[in-house]
Image: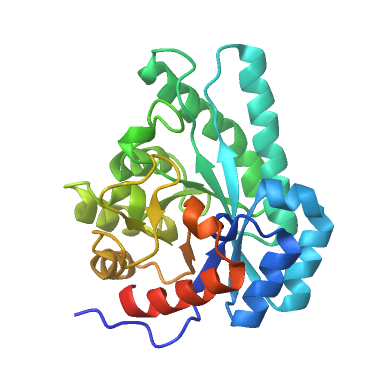
Amino acid sequence: MTQPFQNIDRLSLNQITTNAWNMKEAVDGCARAGVPWIAMWRDKVEAAGLSASRKLAQDAGLRVSSLCRGGYFPAATAAERRARIDDNRRAVDEAAELGAEVLVLVCGPAADRDIEGARAQVAEGIAEIVPYARERGVKLGIEPLHPMYAAQRSVVTTLEQATTMAQLYTPEEVGVVVDVFHVWWDPNLYPQIARAGADGRILGFHVSDWIVPMPDMLLGRGMMGDGVIELRKIRAAVEEAGYTGPIEVEIFNQAIWDMPGDEVVDLMKKRYLEHC
């Protein structure tokens, strides 16, 4: 039986969890709480400045677990698709500058009703940026999203899909990000975790919880322990598959965003130790 964590050495604050905090506030909050990792979002990085964001983390002794997000490859026109490839290259550069080994890919929805065509555009987009990312030492982490987001955020909705896409490349180039909120429901979850881990393709592990009833489709994630996800069972499977890296707490929830940031971080630490 998987034992609870005794420390927070692997805990990472994903910046969306304390969305009201700017970069400096998030870094300072992690430092006060002893959280050793931070997962940065590009809008927060842009607001603070790329070099300033890197320096803030370095000065605080924080490591950057990932940068979110790249992806959103499908588009209605060739010009739009090219613009998105260019933006993904910029995201790779940002990840490299920040010292983040992983750029998280949220692959994007179809521009029309052609979902298979959109998946082909995702595959083409990843193929275009892999060489660029490889040269800069950044791994691409495909994050499958829950099927309810297929029309708005990603046509890649299962870990099986994501791993199949990733296996076209080496594990040093492309892997997957396992987010419990998106994959907990999948009857093939555990075999697919083992499959992804067999050649070291699990590049990230995100935790939150699934609240019943869900208060909002986007802003409805719960703090660990407030919902129905078997968090420790999934963590055990991910570790058995070989992943021992940082564990990001990534929560989209307006009620949590409205709380003082230090209270959120303290609660995050407590629930991480109790439930993950």
Instruction: Tell me which residue sits at (49%, 73%) in the image.
Output: 11
Q: Is residue 49 left or right of residue 64?
A: right
Position of residue 35 relative to residue 25, above or below, is: below
The quadrant of the picture occupied by the C terminus is bottom left
Q: Is residue 118 left or right of residue 57?
A: left
- Single out the residue that lies furthest toward the bottom: 6
Q: Is residue 205 left or right of residue 260?
A: left
| Coloring basis for residues | rainbow
Q: Is residue 60 left or right of residue 269?
A: right
Q: Is residue 144 visible?
A: yes
The quadrant of the picture occupied by the N terminus is bottom left
Residue 159 in percent (x, y) is at 32, 45
Quadrant of res 24: bottom right
Position of residue 5 relative to residue 167, above or below, is: below
Quadrant of res 208: bottom left
Quadrant of res 85: top right
Instruction: Tell me which residue sits at (60%, 67%) in the image.
Output: 261
Q: Is residue 66 visible?
A: no
Residue 89 in percent (x, y) is at 69, 38
Between 256 and 65, the residue placed more toward the observer is 256
Residue 252 in percent (x, y) is at 48, 51
Q: Tag count in the figure?
A: 0
Residue 207 in percent (x, y) is at 40, 61
Between 117 and 135, the residue placed more toward the observer is 117
Position of residue 95 relative to residue 69, above or below, is: below
Instruction: Tell me which residue sits at (27%, 63%) in the image.
Output: 234
Between 125 and 146, the residue placed more toward the observer is 146
